[in-house]
Image (cartoon, rainbow, N blue to C red):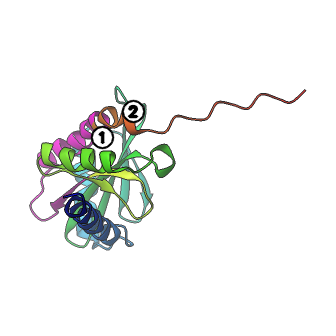
């Protein structure tokens, strides 16, 4: 039973890492698509900044996470929304944590929860740019922000405590 669970968890992680790696390639979209994304960002009413070509960031403040950055990536015909919930240094992957992440994946519709190739925990939504309008965009940006904050609260028991500052030697 443990071998089967371990194989399932390994396969799930491999699949998530493969999908995430593909999304982290240099984004490629045409000027019309980039303009559409900028218009949806404007229409959302949220303050945003440009991070790189075809990459924008909307910042939120959560109850659990002080700063939530929702990264909007235009890639080919896709609109990828992603937010880092915890950096690799902030948690230790364990079977219990992986099981928690798999259950969280089941709890959310259209939202992916995973660990990327850098080892950071993320939430993500992939949308078709062709059919996404400003209302749908705003709804999904806000959903990513809220989910990141909720998931951060759910994984708190798995976070590594920050080391206590060293006392100066006298």
For the residues labelled 2 and 1, say whether their Cβ atoms are less than 8 Å apart: yes
The quadrant in which the N terminus is found is bottom left
The residue where tag 2 is placed is 65
Q: x, y (%) of residue 31? A: 29, 70
The quadrant in which the C terminus is found is top right
- From the viewer's perspective, is 108 left or right of 34? left
Q: x, y (%) of residue 57? A: 38, 49
Q: x, y (%) of residue 33? A: 23, 66
Seen from this angle, which residue lies furthest front? 1
90 and 65: which one is in front? 90
- From the viewer's perspective, is 89 left or right of 109? right
Q: Secondary structure at mark 1?
A: helix
Q: Which numbered tag is attached to residue 56? A: none
84 and 26: which one is in front? 84
The quarter of the picture where residue 164 lies is top right
Q: Secondary structure at mark 2?
A: loop
Measure the alpha-carbon separation of dots 2 and 1. Answer: 8 Å
Asked if 155 appears above or below 75 in the picture, the reply is: above
For label 2, the crowd category at 10 Å Cα-Cα, with few meaning under 14, some 14 to 19 and many 20 or more, is some
Q: Which numbered tag is attached to residue 148? A: 1
Residue 141 sits inside the magenta stretch: yes
Question: What's the magenta region?
Answer: 124-150
142 and 53: which one is in front? 142
Residue drawn 19% across the image and 63% down it? 4
Give the main secondary structure, helix, strand or loop, of the magenta stretch. helix
Q: Earlier in the sequence, mark 2 or mark 1?
A: 2
The quarter of the picture where residue 28 lies is bottom left
């Amino acid at each position: 039973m443990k071998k089967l669970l371990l194989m399932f968890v390994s396969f799930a992680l491999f699949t998530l890492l493969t999908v995430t790696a593909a999304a982290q390639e240099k984004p490629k979209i045409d000027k019309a698509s980039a303009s559409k994304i900028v218009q949806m960002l404007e229409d959302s009413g949220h303050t945003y900044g440009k991070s790189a070509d075809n990459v924008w960031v909307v910042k939120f403040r959560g109850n659990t996470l002080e700063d939530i950055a929702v990264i909007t990536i235009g890639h080919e015909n896709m609109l990828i929304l992603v937010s880092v919930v915890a950096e690799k240094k902030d948690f230790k992957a364990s079977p219990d944590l992986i099981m928690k992440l798999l259950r969280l994946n089941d709890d959310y519709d259209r939202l992916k929860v995973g660990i990327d190739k850098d080892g950071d925990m993320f939430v993500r939504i992939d949308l078709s740019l062709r059919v996404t309008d400003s209302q749908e965009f705003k709804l999904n940006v806000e959903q990513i922000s809220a989910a990141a904050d909720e998931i951060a609260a759910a994984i708190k028991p798995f976070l590594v405590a920050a080391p206590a500052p060293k006392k100066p030697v006298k």
